[in-house]
Image (spheres, helix red, strand yellow):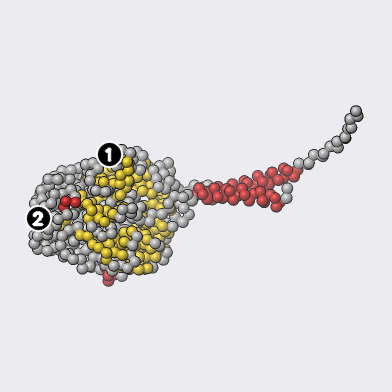
Amino acid sequence: MSNKKLILICIPFIVFVVLIINAHSKTTEDNDWKYPGFDQYTNNFYHKQSQINSKNAKNLEIKWAWEIPRRSPPVRDKEGNVVRGGWTPPLVIEGIVYTATFDNQFFALDAKNGNAICKYEVPKDKIDSQLRYSGRGITYHNGSILMTAADCSIYAFDSKDCSVKWTMPSTCENIPGNLGFYRGMNPPLIFGDYLIATNTGGEYGARGFVAAYSLSTKKLLWRWYVTPPQVEGPKNWHIEAHKGNVKPYKDDWGNSSLIGGGTIWGWPAIDTEKGILYLGTGDPSPDLNGATRPGPNLYTDSVVALNISNGKMMWYYQLTSHDLYDHDIGVSIILEEIEINGKKEKIIVAGSKSGYVLVLKANNGKLLYNPVPISIHFNDINDNNPNANLTLESAEGKVICPANNGGVQASPAFADGNIYVVGQNQCLKMVSNPVKSREDFFGGRSINAGLEENSTLHVIDAATGKILWTFFMNSSYRKGSATISGDLVLLGADNGFAYILDRNNGRLLFQLDVGAPIGAPITIGADADGKMRIFVPFGSRGARGRENGIIALGLKESKFNAGYLLAVLIVLIILFAIYKYKKLKKQKPAKNPKIKSKTKSF
């Protein structure tokens, strides 16, 4: 056999091995995390990767850690305090990690090593000296990363170099019927040519709303208001009460202009087939004090369904009427489909700071079953109560459980028919305050009642409401989420611990103290080599002496990884081919014997 023939035999074998190993190392799984809640329109926080799983999670290690650099000069709030921190779930797209901060810095990092690729800072003069700062994420659209700045303007950054591709003016200026103060929070939600914008500021008396703009023209299409105009006199806000679960109350919101709230904290969901927008609304204000706002205070503390083409309300479900405890629905809304008695049913899942989980029929807002309690409940007389006291001024002197920072304050997740949601146990004593101004619009405060806070992950069968298993954490749990990754549950608590559990039974597989509160959802995605990384965002306004940042976890590298294995296999194939060639060469061909012909005579 000639050398040429030998090479021709070896090449197909080598190509075959390379293709097999390459296919194994780069599976068809989604390597990215493009949107805050993973799925753009359902917010399920469910990444189906299997590279990191319950069998190898114990082998995780820190690959890199990155801290957010401070701005110079810094952005300061109205009282002169330096603005720090962030609540942004890291996005992961084609091996690049994206994040943003309260002071409106935007960063792109290499997922392999945490090195900064590029950054952008919103000009300081546009966002300085506001009452308060927050930021709950960025999102991806058509090669751009979108962010809502503190002044409610929207920026589209190029995903490759962080340059500004386009901007949109503030979506919270000159809002009719508003006397309060807004601030930017969530990134816009894009659906077709609709750009959905929401903002916060209810604690400063802002009038809650959601708006739709044309993405192509940036023109306002419609705006739907959660609360009535802030004017003296009757509000007539009961006209559409029949569309939901609360009886019409003619004097809802009373006659005072000292009202507001209902701003949107969580990420909305969209039924893309029917064109329906679902959102959770904030609590009414003045916060913790109902003296100026009798009635159920529609449509605060509610799940609301809107026709996305015109902003008309289709239905609502209010969980807490005449809220005195700051029990808003401030986390992301989940839209999913389950099977009930052999039939498919679209459902809405919402968690509330009241410590209940709502599961509603998406088509009409009716309860699938009674709200599921996942926190201690004590003195919360207006939560989940059709006979709520609609004229109560405050909860003065009472210990309330859950208090104003308890219940569900982290976004739930959904996977394979189950809901994953963390409920907090927080009990505080309520003290009422007179409302002084829009800048000091809190009508009360809460003080320590001598009871420790803790949290528990609950896994709930979405079809029945039955709790399947739980996982206890001796810490509060705010602003993050439950994240599902393959057969794992990823959790990040305020005590700085990241927990990784077996999704099937809640068994603890891995934990890590990152040294600062985990104040945003944990995400997962691949670096440029296709290796999965778990991204843990740590820090909350500089708590525990650390700046905010990201820690990347990955599996410990084997000494014989796929690259080494490929090289070894190729060498073995070549050696085997050489061996066969030499063996064949040594063999002498047998001589053909001469056959004598014999003729038979007859």
Amino acid carrying mark 2 in the image: Asp
The picture quadrant where one finds residue 257 is: bottom left
Picture coordinates of residue 153, whole percent (x, y): 28, 66
The picture quadrant where one finds residue 160 is: bottom left
Q: Is residue 409 visible?
A: yes
Amino acid carrying mark 1 in the image: Thr
Lateral position of residue 384 relative to residue 335, left or right: left
Residue at position x 34%, y 57% from top? 549
Residue at position x 38%, y 56% from top? 34
> Label 2's element?
loop
Q: Residue furthest bottom?
A: 125
Picture coordinates of residue 563, whole percent (x, y): 54, 50
Q: Residue furthest top?
A: 602
Q: Compare residues 320 and 251 and report the one nearer the observer.
A: 251
Q: Residue furthest front?
A: 602
Q: Which residue is mark 2?
A: 251
Picture coordinates of residue 73, whole percent (x, y): 30, 69
- Name which of mark 1 and mark 2 comes first in the sequence: 2
Picture coordinates of residue 420, whole percent (x, y): 30, 45
Q: Which residue is mark 1?
A: 464
Q: Compare residues 547 and 257 and report the one nearer the observer.
A: 257
